[in-house]
Amino acid sequence: MMKWFWLALLGFAPFLHAELNPLAVPGGVALIDLGPAQEQQTPPQIWLDQQPVAVIARQGHWQALVGIPLDTPSGALELRQGATPDTGKSLSLQVQPKSYPAQYLSLKNKGQVNLSPADEARALKEIEEIKALKRTWRPTPYVDTAFIQPAKGRLSSRFGLQRFFNGEARAPHSGLDVAAAKGATVFSAGAGKVLAVGDYFFNGKSVFVDHGQGLISLYCHLDTLTVHEGQWLEKGQTLGTVGSTGRATGPHLHWTVVLNGTNVDPALFIQP
């Protein structure tokens, strides 16, 4: 029994880890082999800048699960293996180039493009709050990367699009949009703990779910919220309904996936 317990913690049980679709590009996810994982062995500690990186036991080896920031240039990306971000040995990840198409959107509410001083102050404060939430780290013995699409509907605006609102350039699209009618059910893409719920200027009514080891999912523009902070959710459990709150051109679900503090392409986690 004890041997099975440790095997499960290390991820050797076959149902703990499904295949991820790794893609070492800006906004993608890379897998770095760290050597054999021995029974009861402590996993290596990996860092990207000051942010810890998820490490999983997969096919008998430790592997780092690295989210690559969208603004990363092609070439070598340095990570560190050690007790702290400034100690230990250097690891190198080769990032391949990738370009994303442009998307032009029209917003009737001009105040959501050119913000008033009050709205700008609110938005900037919320942006910092959201950045802090995305850097959350909760140690877990394994990470389930087999996500399900969190709402039924067509995948519309893809991750990484270079966005223009009313002709003005804005930040690239940080997630994946699911086209669905107002009131459609939204459910958690994977099991995890509700990290936060809130109503934000840009994102509208939103839910953050912490899946462990820096893997976080975010569900935005919701019409209703049916969960609370600290609640545990199983994969597929309802957390709200589709809406158009915040800066949205119409009802849809905006779904973001975060890994080691950076937004990555949610499509890489959807299992066929």
Image (cartoon, rainbow, N blue to C red):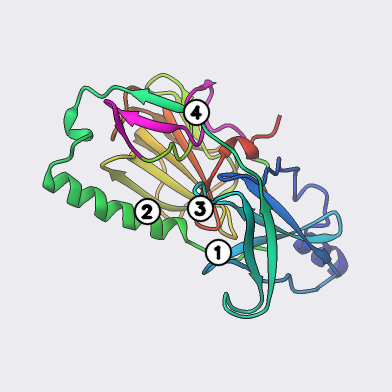
| Left or right: where 224 falls relative to 232 | left
**Of the residues under marks 2 and 3, which one precedes in the sequence?**
2
| Left or right: where 226 falls relative to 264 | left
**Of the residues under marks 1 and 4, which one precedes in the sequence?**
4
Instruction: Determine the residue positioned at 18% across, 52% down.
Output: 121
Looking at the rendered structure, the kind of residue marked 3 is Thr
Instruction: Determine the residue positioned at 25% across, 52% down.
Output: 124
Q: Disc 3 and disc 1: Cα gap in Å?
A: 16 Å
Quadrant of the frame with the C terminus: top right
Query: In this picture, is 146 found above or below 93?
Result: above
Dot 2, crowdedness within 10 Å: few (<14), some or many (≥20)? some
**Residue range (magenta):** 147-170
**Of the residues under marks 1 and 2, which one precedes in the sequence?**
2
In this view, the mark in front (4 or 3):
4
**Of the residues under marks 3 and 1, which one precedes in the sequence?**
1
Q: Disc 2 and disc 4: Cα gap in Å?
A: 26 Å
User: Can you give x and y, in whole percent of width and height, for residue 56 in the image?
Assistant: 72, 59
Q: Disc 2 and disc 3: Cα gap in Å?
A: 11 Å
Looking at the rendered structure, the kind of residue marked 4 is Pro
Mark 2, secondary structure of its residue? helix
Dot 1, crowdedness within 10 Å: few (<14), some or many (≥20)? few
User: Can you give x and y, in whole percent of width and height, for residue 6 in the image?
Assistant: 81, 67
**Of the residues under marks 4 and 3, which one precedes in the sequence?**
4
Please state the total of marks drawn on the protein image.
4
Front in this rendered view, residue 223 or 27: 27
Name the residue carrying label 3: 262
Name the residue carrying label 4: 101
Q: Disc 1 and disc 4: Cα gap in Å?
A: 34 Å
Looking at the rendered structure, the kind of residue marked 2 is Ile
Name the residue carrying label 1: 138
Name the residue carrying label 2: 130
